[in-house]
Every structure is written in C-alpha cells, then in structure tokens.
C-alpha cells in the first residue's frame, strides 16, 4: 500500500507517493504561470491548475504502480478560490494570496462589521489577501460572476470536485477564508450574511484527517490509480507542512521557504489575545486534533528569486538550459559569500505579518557604483530573512518563543540559503530527509485515515530529521547589528511614502 500527497501551490503543484512506512517512492512536479493582467492582480487559471495536478498525480501514481495508492490528501495554498457554475464551469481565475485588488474594501467592511468582532470569530485580522475581501470585490466588480456562481471553492475542495468527489474543505483551509468560526468549526452565519453569501455556496467543513469520499472508477483509471482510492481532508499548506516537518510541541516551528516565506508553530489551545491581534498573528486550526497554529509570513519569498531569475538571471538560465543544472542552484552560487552593506525592505508584494501593509513598496538601500549583482541577490534574501526574524521577535514578545526551526520547501534544499537564514535568524535550522513536507504531511493524513492509526503515531517513522545548520557566530553578530536598523526601516519608509502622498494614512 502507498499514499499520495498533493500540494497545490501558487506557482506549481507536486504529487508525491509514500510507502506505508513513509518512504518517498515518487515525486512529480508541474509548474504553471502566475498571471497579472492588471497591476496588483495575481491570478491562476484554475483549469490549468487542475490539469497539471492530474498530470502530476498520473506520473507519480504510475511510477509507484507496484505499490498501489490507497488514499490521498491535499495540501494547498490558502485564500484563493474559484467561482464555479452549477454545471461545473469555472467562471473566473482564482485570485491568489498576493492579489491586492480588494485593498480598498477592507477598511469599510471591517469598520461596519467590527474589526474586533471579526478577530474574535475567525482568529484573523483583516487583509486583502483573505477570501472574504476577494468575494466582496467580486460581488462589487463582477456582479455577473458572483450571481452565476453556484459555489466558491478553494483549491482543496475545487480539486476534490474535479475528481468527482462531493467537496469538503478542511478546517485549517476554511480558516483562511475569514468566513469560518474558529471555535465552532462552522461557517459563521453573521459574516456570510454581511457578504451576501449562503452556506450552500461553500463546501462543507471537515476536520483534517477525516475521509471525504472515494475517487470514482473512471477518474481513477484516468489518473493511473486503482479503484476506490480514499480522499482525505488535508489542509492549508503551512500547517500541513508543519505536520510533515514533525511539529507537534510548542517552541518548535516549521520554516517553509517557498513562494511565500512562512514560519508555522503549534499550540495546545486557541491563542486569541490582543498582543497577537496587534501583530496580525492569527489563530486557527492545526492539522492535529485539538491543536491550533499561527503563521508568520512574508508574501515575498521564493517568488523574489524567480523575479530575479526572470529579470537578471539570463546567464544562469542559459547555462541551466545548456547543462541541465538547476537555475536556482546556479543563482545561489553567484550570490555574494558574505553579509552585504545593503538593507532591503522586501515588500515586492503586499507585506505579510506583522504589518499587513499592501501599499508600501520594496526598497533597496545602500547601493553604490561598486555594488555587484551578487551582492544585490544576497541582499534580497537577507531582506526576507530579516522580515522573518522580525516576526519571530514579535511572537516571542507575546510569550510564544520559537527556539527550533525545521526547514522545508525548495529553499531548504540549498545549503547556502539555509546557512544565510540561520545566520540572520541567529537560530539553528534543522533540515529534513524529505524537504517536501507538505506532500508528506498530506500523505501521512491519508495513511492515518486509511489504516486507523493516529497521525502522531506515524510521525516517528515518517519524519526523518537531517543535519542541523548552526548560525556562524561572526556573521550572526553582523546581522544582529543590522537587525536593529532593519526594525526602523518600515516605519521610516511608511512615513516618507505617506509624506510624498503615495500611500494613504
């Protein structure tokens, strides 16, 4: 028997098959384009995403046919949803987390409904990334689409429906919509009424690890799967990845280096207090029963390396095409080896926690005619790491210090990037034998549901920690000094931007 984890990300999807003992049998990947038809917009073609997910599943399942898949689960990006007509037609592209078109609707709705009330019900503070505000934009600007949509489905439940299963959305993913009551684990009727949405237009909520249904025979055959493969509720990719990294206790957190840079710890109870609220640090369901989590994140992460690749990485792209080497490995090799004299505010997208500022743009300070391309590249990674250190400091000030980090995602595969982040964060970072922890966490939930084994009891066999990267004392000291300046950078830039009349107060 084997188990499949599907991770539906912002710029690509991965399907991984694991044995019943947690050994990776096959990983398949497909990349799809992130579309930006207007400034501030960020979309995915949902039909393309579903097709690519199907291709990845088929490749992984076919390669592991000798050990047939018995159950699968989905890890996916948060917030993005697709309007779907009653006949199954996709009516519009999905707006992903970094899409900022709803920024002008956030304040008015929050004031009218009550920002504190929103936080107490959902565990989240308002930001244009959340589904609620994207839905309000759709209702206002695309009234035809809003009216015609029989359902609004996030990518977990959208792909379940694509498979032919009656869709159910996991509690962690439902939490990212800001339509979900974090205490009752139901859609919050008062919020739905304020948005003008009936509960029937959303998938039913289900606890992570619960069985949703089984893939029909014709679809299973098309995907190279055996009959009656179970579909198990998964979750938002960050807590699923944290589970796949073995995070089950306070003080330990997953550090995901993907399109979005994210740190995800686990708590034994909901943490809804004003210190977290002021820092926009949410509380919502974890992927284990009776546990909760938060996310410390920068919406600018691996997408910044992709931007650098597309704008200035032509030599590495050409070498990768010629030699078959990974273009990102070549880029990191060209990165400056030592801490730079540059200071970067990394808001190439709207900022994440703690500021939730969709207006202040990125900045690179300290450029000279002697500055090299390798220094600029390193400074961009330093800036994102500084932002994550800021988030860790804020979390510690709220009494939830994180001392151990477990690295997952594409960035975890690069020793140079992991070392740089350990130096900036001044904390040890443990890598994992399987860096694709979101796929592993989803497959583990599938295995637990199929075998009746508690997920915690599978972790010891499935999650294998690798080497721990320690901070370099000299570089960490240098970054400690730079961090004091970094903490002042956002307030200074915000005030300057407002004085110039380029951002609202």
Image (cartoon, rainbow, N blue to C red):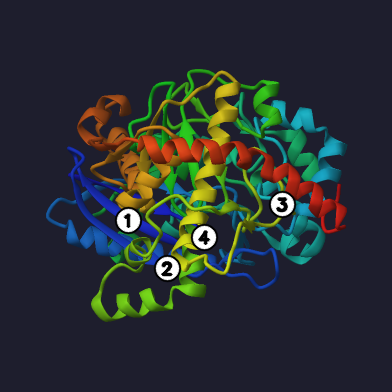
Q: CA distance from mark 2 to mark 4?
A: 26 Å
What SS does tag 2 mark?
helix
What SS does tag 4 mark?
helix
The disc placed on residue 304 is 4
**Among numbered discs 3 and 1, the one appearing first in the sequence:** 1
Spot occupied by residue 297 in the image (x, y as percentages of width and height): 55, 42
Q: Are marks 1 and 4 in contact (CB under 8 Å)?
A: no
Q: Nearer the viewer, mark 3 or mark 1?
A: 3
In the image, 26 versus 344, the foreground residue is 344
Residue at x-position 62% and y-position 63% = 42
Q: Are marks 2 and 4 in contact (CB under 8 Å)?
A: no
In the displayed structure, 88 sits above or below 419; it is below
Q: CA distance from mark 3 to mark 2?
A: 32 Å
Viewer can see residue 235: no
**Among numbered discs 2 and 4, the one appearing first in the sequence:** 2
Quadrant location of residue 421? top left
Q: Nearer the viewer, mark 2 or mark 1?
A: 1
Residue placed under numbered mark 1 in the picture: 15
In the image, 127 versus 179, the foreground residue is 127
Residue placed under numbered mark 3 in the picture: 358
**Among numbered discs 1 and 4, the one appearing first in the sequence:** 1
**Among numbered discs 4 and 3, the one appearing first in the sequence:** 4
């Amino acid at each position: 028997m084997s188990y499949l984890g599907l991770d539906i990300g912002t710029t690509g999807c991965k399907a991984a098959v694991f044995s019943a003992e947690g050994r990776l049998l096959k990983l398949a990947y497909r990349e799809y384009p992130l579309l930006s038809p207007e400034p501030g917009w960020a979309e995915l073609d949902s039909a393309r995403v579903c097709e690519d997910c199907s291709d990845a599943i088929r490749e992984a399942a076919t390669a592991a046919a000798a050990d047939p898949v018995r159950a699968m689960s989905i890890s996916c990006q948060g917030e993005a949803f697709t309007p779907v007509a009653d006949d199954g037609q996709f009516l519009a592209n999905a707006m992903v987390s970094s899409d900022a078109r709803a920024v002008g609707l956030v304040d008015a709705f929050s004031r009218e409904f009550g920002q504190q009330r929103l936080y107490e019900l959902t565990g989240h503070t308002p930001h244009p990334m959340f589904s609620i505000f994207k839905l309000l934009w759709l209702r206002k600007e695309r009234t035809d689409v809003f009216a015609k949509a029989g359902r609004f489905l996030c990518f977990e439940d959208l792909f379940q429906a694509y498979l032919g299963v009656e869709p159910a959305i996991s509690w962690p993913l439902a939490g990212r919509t800001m339509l979900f009551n974090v205490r009752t684990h139901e859609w919050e009727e008062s919020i739905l009424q304020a948005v003008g949405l009936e509960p029937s237009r959303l998938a039913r909520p289900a606890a992570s690890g619960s069985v949703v249904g089984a893939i029909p025979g014709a679809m299973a055959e098309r995907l190279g799967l055996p009959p009656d493969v179970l579909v198990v509720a998964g979750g938002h990719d960050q807590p699923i990845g944290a589970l796949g990294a073995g995070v089950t206790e306070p003080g330990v957190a997953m550090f995901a280096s993907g399109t979005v840079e994210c740190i995800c710890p686990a708590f034994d109870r909901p943490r809804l207090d004003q210190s977290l609220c002021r820092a926009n640090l949410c509380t919502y369901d974890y992927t284990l029963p009776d546990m909760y989590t938060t996310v410390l994140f920068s919406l600018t992460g691996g997408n910044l390396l992709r931007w650098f690749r597309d704008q200035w990485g032509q030599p590495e792209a050409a070498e990768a095409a010629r030699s078959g080497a990974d273009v990102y490995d070549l880029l990191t090799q060209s990165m400056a080896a030592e801490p730079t004299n540059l200071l970067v505010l990394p808001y190439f997208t709207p900022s994440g926690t703690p500021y939730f500022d969709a207006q202040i743009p990125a900045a690179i300070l300290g450029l000279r005619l002697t500055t090299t391309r390798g220094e600029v590249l390193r400074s961009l990674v330093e800036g994102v790491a500084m932002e994550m250190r800021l988030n860790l400091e804020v979390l510690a000030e709220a009494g939830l210090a994180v001392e151990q980090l477990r690295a997952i995602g594409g960035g975890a595969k690069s020793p140079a990037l992991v070392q740089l982040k350990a130096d900036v964060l001044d904390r040890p970072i443990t890598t994992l034998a399987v860096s694709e922890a979101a796929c592993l966490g989803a497959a583990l939930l599938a295995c637990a549901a199929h075998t009746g084994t508690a997920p915690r009891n599978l972790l010891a066999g499935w999650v294998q920690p690798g080497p721990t990267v320690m901070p370099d004392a000299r570089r960490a000291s240098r970054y400690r000094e730079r961090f004091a300046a970094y903490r002042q950078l956002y307030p200074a830039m915000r005030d300057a931007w407002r004085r110039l009349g380029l951002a609202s107060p």
